[in-house]
Image: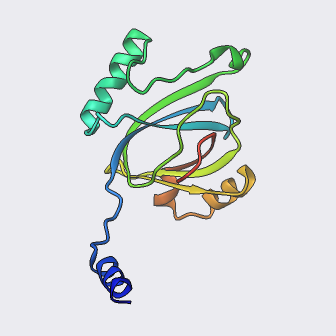
Amino acid sequence: MNKGILSLLALLAAPVVAAQPEVYLVASVQLGGSNLAQSIFLHEPQITTLEECQEAVRVGQRDRDWQRYHHIFMRDRFQGFTGHLDYRCVFSAQRFSGWNDRARYNHPYLISIDAQSNLQVERISSQAQCATRLKGLPPARQAISRCAVGNQSLL
């Protein structure tokens, strides 16, 4: 019985540790002239600052060889359409499952990135509901938010 009480006390005395923000690269492609977008959330543990992330993006775009934040943008799937590619380095306390280029993009998200590059992702049940939710946001929040589908889960 004493062991049980001691274990309970130790558990209660343990400090509560909130998830520390980590640096992520949010890569999004939007189908030109529409509100259809796909986003992925990439994390490299050795990249700890926005500046390091931005440098990795510059090198990846310049060399067309993503040694960091490795991903593939399949332009052939957009034949006949214009796809606008956007990269944003952000801080996030939220965690995501690993990205897999073959997984289906069936997770609609409301994605917001504030002026301090803080990412907030909210799972929404459908793209249509996300669009409705986005329109109902205050103008300031609407300006920093968008709907997109992803193939990663919020952890």
Residue at the image point whose x is 34% and y is 83% from the top:
3
Above or below residue 77? Residue 103 is below
- The colour style of the image is rainbow
Up-down relation of residue 129 to residue 147 (above or below) = below
Q: Is residue 27 left or right of residue 133?
A: left
Q: Residue furthest top?
A: 63
Q: Is residue 147 found left or right of 44 in the rendered image?
A: right
Q: Quadrant of residue 104?
A: top right
Q: Indicate the position of residue 23 as horizontal and vertical percent values.
A: 34, 42
The percent coordinates of residue 43 (x first, y second) are: 41, 37
State left or right for residue 139 relative to residue 36.
left
**Left or right of 151: which side holds 56?**
left
Image quadrant assignment for residue 106: top right
Q: How many marks?
A: 0
- x 37%, y 43%: residue: 90
| Residue 143 spot, x, y in % from top left | 49, 52
- Relative to the observer, which residue lies in front, 12 or 32? 12
Q: Quadrant of the N terminus?
A: bottom left
Residue at 46% x, 50% y is 95
Q: Residue at x 48, y 59 (%)?
A: 141
How far across and down, in percent of the image, does residue 100 sit? Answer: 59, 31
Pick the front one: 75 or 137 = 75
Relative depth, front residue between 135 and 94: 94
